[in-house]
Every structure is written in C-alpha cells, then in structure tokens.
Image (cartoon, grey):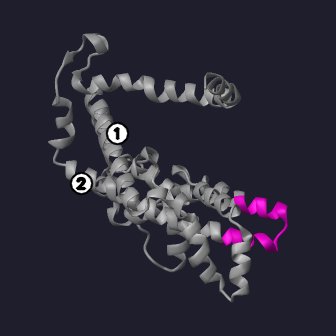
C-alpha cells in the first residue's frame, strides 16, 4: 500500500508543479490579504498601524446599515447584478449558438475570427466611448440621431430614468463576448452524432437547440451562474462611477455599495468603514453561493459545484 501511494504521488508530481504558480498567486493575492479583515473591527489610524489601532466592535458597519441610503444602494446593487446575470447569459448563449450554426458553412480561419469577434467588440466599451455617444453637446446620439429626426437633445447625465437601461446594455456589451467564447468551446465538445440522428428523425434547428444544445449546456450555465451569484453584492466600479461620470443627478438610480463606500472614503478618509463594507459584501456573497449551491444540489445533484 505504501509503495502504491508513493508511486501515485510521483505520477501526479508534474501536475502539482504545473498548478504551483497559480496556487502561489491565489495564496498571495486572496488569502494573505484576509488578515486585513481585522481593520473592519478597528478604529484604524495610520500612525498606530493595524495592531496599535483601537478596537471599535461593529461601529464601522453602522456606516452602511444606519445610512438613509442603505436600502437604495443595496437594492440597486442586487437588481443590477441579477439583470446582468440573466440578460448576459441569454446574450452569450445566443451568440454561441449562432456561431456554432455557421461553423460548417465557413472555413476554419473565418470561424476562428468569428469566435474572437464578440470578445474584441465587447472590450471596446469604456467610459470615454459611452461619453462620445451620450455627450449632451457633441454626443453621437444627440447630434446625429436625435438631431436628424428633429428632436430636442437629451441631457443624459442629468436624466436618471435612462440609466438602468444604459448600464445594463453597456455591461452586457462588454462582458458577453468572453462568456460566449466559453459556451462556444462547450458546444464544440458535444457529440455531433446526436445532431445527425436528430436531423435524420426530422428535428428542426430549433428542436435541436431545445432538446440537445440547451440540456447539454446546463452544467456550464449553472457553474457560471453560481460563480456570478457570489458577486451580486459587488458592482463594477468603473461602470457605475466612471461611465456615469460620477454625476450627482444619477446617484439614486446608479448608486451601489461600492460607489457609496468610495464616496464615503474620499469624504471621511475612514479605512475601517471601507474594510467593513468589503467584509460584509464577501460574507453575503459566500452565503449566497452556499444557498444557490444547496438549491442546485436538491434540484440536480450532478450539476452542483460541491
């Protein structure tokens, strides 16, 4: 038995060595900083350091829970992220299925280009590009579209009602490309004989997608969704702060936990409050992952993460 275990360990050694750089990175980047959690429970002073600063219990968490904006920023954070997950998943799957449909009709080089195209297009969206479209004075929409139709320009950065749709569109646009590549790779691994048999039986393209592609994509969809659920209490800071140009008129519709904490940190300079918010977000995300995985285990045990 001892020889067998020693042999197995030696056989797996190359794989351990391959994983070592990633494990070292995760340990340094994810686990060592966890020591900073103690700052959330201290009245942190730079001059005193982490160990010398006084304990303050849960006082830092009052910054979030006793704020009059607490409900609004929490609601925005959750609803936006769920919209991102649902709409982003649908768009990514749609593009992946579309690319797979044209796979047999184009050459290999063209297909490889088509796979990368959604990703390359999606990363174009950044704050200055959005501003180029929405600028009240020189934006493309006001000057070319609305102006060409004879309609009055819109002050986009002062009208909060438009931004839930704008933010959802921008986020989906910049993220669906990467996710669609994952789904394309998954679909490429399916057994083509299933589609051939379905075609022989007279199944239409929609029926093949419904009865073969979607059920086979189910594990991948669940895995990516569970990974996204863990971050529903986090928001893309660049999206909600930079794309909106930090406009005060939009805070009610675009304010999230991350932007609220950043503004509070810039105004008060309280690092302990920022640490408390980060700890709160991580804790809730961990609980949500456990809950979502538990539900998945009851509905489909084979598709659960653990």
Crowd tier of the residue under label 2, counting other residues whose Cα lies within 10 Å: few below 14, some 14–19, many 20 or above: some
Query: Residue placed at 31% from the left, 39% from the top?
Result: 283
At which x and y percent is residue 205? Answer: 65, 82
Q: Which residue is mark 2?
A: 72
Q: In the displayed structure, does residue 4 sit left or right of residue 86?
A: right
Spatial CA distance of label 2 from label 1 is 19 Å
Query: Residue placed at 63% from the left, 79% from the top?
Result: 208
At which x and y percent is residue 37? Answer: 32, 26
Secondary structure of the residue carrying tag 1 is helix
At which x and y percent is residue 71? Answer: 21, 52
> Relative to residue 213, is residue 65 depicted above or below?
above
Magenta-tinted stretch: 98-115
Nearer to the camera, 74 or 201: 201
> Relative to residue 81, is residue 107 depicted above or below?
below
Nearer to the camera, 192 or 233: 192
Residue 228 appears in the figure = yes
Nearer to the camera, 88 or 157: 88
Task: Tell whether position 244 is magenta.
Answer: no
Q: Which residue lies most toward the bottom here?
A: 202
Task: Tell whether position 110 is magenta.
Answer: yes
Q: Which residue is mark 1?
A: 282
Query: Residue placed at 62% from the left, 26% from the top?
Result: 5
Residue 263 appears in the figure = no
Give the main secondary structure, helix, strand or loop, of the magenta stretch. Answer: helix
> Relative to residue 280, is residue 68 depicted above or below?
below
């Amino acid at each position: 038995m001892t020889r067998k275990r020693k042999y197995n360990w030696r056989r797996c050694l190359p794989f351990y060595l391959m994983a070592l750089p990633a494990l070292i990175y995760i340990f340094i980047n994810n686990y060592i900083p966890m020591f900073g959690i103690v700052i959330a429970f201290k009245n942190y002073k730079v001059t005193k350091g982490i160990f010398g600063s006084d304990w303050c219990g849960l006082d830092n968490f009052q910054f979030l829970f006793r704020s009059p904006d607490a409900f609004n920023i929490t609601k925005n954070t959750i609803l936006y992220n769920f919209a991102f997950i649902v709409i982003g998943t649908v768009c990514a799957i749609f593009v992946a299925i579309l690319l797979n449909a044209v796979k047999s009709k184009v050459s290999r080089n063209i297909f490889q280009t088509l796979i990368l195209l959604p990703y390359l297009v999606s990363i174009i969206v950044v704050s200055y590009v959005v501003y180029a479209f929405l600028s009240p004075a020189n934006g493309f929409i006001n000057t070319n579209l609305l102006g060409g139709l004879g309609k009055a320009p819109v002050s986009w950065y002062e009208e909060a009602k438009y931004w839930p749709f704008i933010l959802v569109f921008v986020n989906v646009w910049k993220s669906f490309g990467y996710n669609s590549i994952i789904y394309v790779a998954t679909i490429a691994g399916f057994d083509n004989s299933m589609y051939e048999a379905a075609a022989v039986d007279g199944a239409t393209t929609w029926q093949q997608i419904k009865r073969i592609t979607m059920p086979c994509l189910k594990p991948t969809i669940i895995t990516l969704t569970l990974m996204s659920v863990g971050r529903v209490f986090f928001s893309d800071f660049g999206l909600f702060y930079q794309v909106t140009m930090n406009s005060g008129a939009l805070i009610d519709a675009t304010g999230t936990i991350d932007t609220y904490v950043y503004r509070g940190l810039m105004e008060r300079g309280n690092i302990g409050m920022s640490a408390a918010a980060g700890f709160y977000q991580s804790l809730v995300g961990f609980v949500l992952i456990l809950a979502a995985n538990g539900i998945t285990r009851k509905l489909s045990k084979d598709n659960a993460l653990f």
